[in-house]
Image (cartoon, rainbow, N blue to C red):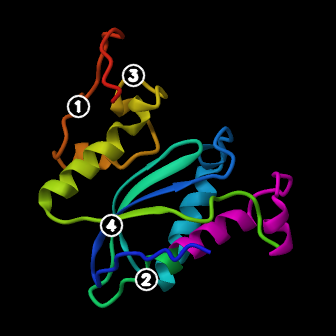
Amino acid sequence: MTDYRRYRVKGGTYFFTVNLVERKRKLLTEHVDLLRDAFRTVKKDHPFQIDAIVILPDHLHTVWTLPEEDNDFSLRWRQIKSAFSRNIETGERISKSRNQKQERGIWQRRFWEHAIRDERDFANHLDYIHFNPVKHKLVKRVIEWPYSSFHRYVRLGMYLFDWFGFEDESLDFEH
């Protein structure tokens, strides 16, 4: 078994990527209200601040800041995934190992995290999050994606509403 260690900072700010097992499914946007409820429920018992988020059909990216003396983001993700999964109809494909452990086959077991180092790192990750629906060709303009904190940042004056809003389809910003 892999010895996987996570970098933890009490009161830290982290960037996360969390994926569905079946990357072709659209559970997160089809059931966005259930996902929002899962976040709210977990935040009541285990507070954290959502600095930015984008929810795509099969994965999400978010930046969180944890309370000053807390670094347990894994507990929060486990509970969010569980709360969401409990409200989704069964029927997904389940691997033999998941079946033996009586696990659902909705979420990938692991998630990607990155501890934010400074203001520039924070800003770069916010840009990455907010540009993601355009990157995945879900919309042409960032403002068109409804499941994003981008709209809040526009209201706060931190982004212009037409940030990365291209009308010219010949422009390609894929990496």
Residue 33 place in picture, x, y as percent: 60, 54
Residue 15 place in picture, x, y as percent: 35, 61
Q: Amino acid at mark 1?
A: Trp
Callout 1 secondary element: loop
**Magenta-drawn segment:** 77-101
For the residue carrying disc 3, how many other residues have a C-alpha within 10 Å: few (<14), some (14-19), or many (20+)? some
Above or below: residue 143 compared with residue 10: above
Q: Amino acid at mark 2?
A: Asp
The reply to whether dot 2 and dot 3 touch (C-beta < 8 Å) is no
For the residue carrying disc 4, how many other residues have a C-alpha within 10 Å: few (<14), some (14-19), or many (20+)? many
User: Measuring 35% from the left and 26% from the top, which residue is drawn there?
Assistant: 174
Q: Is residue 42 left or right of residue 20?
A: left
Above or below: residue 117 compared with residue 57: below
CA gap, disc 1 and disc 2: 34 Å
Q: Which residue is labeled 1 in the image?
A: 163
The reply to whether dot 1 and dot 4 touch (C-beta < 8 Å) is no
Residue 156 place in picture, x, y as percent: 20, 50
Q: Residue furthest left?
A: 119
Q: Amino acid at mark 4?
A: Tyr
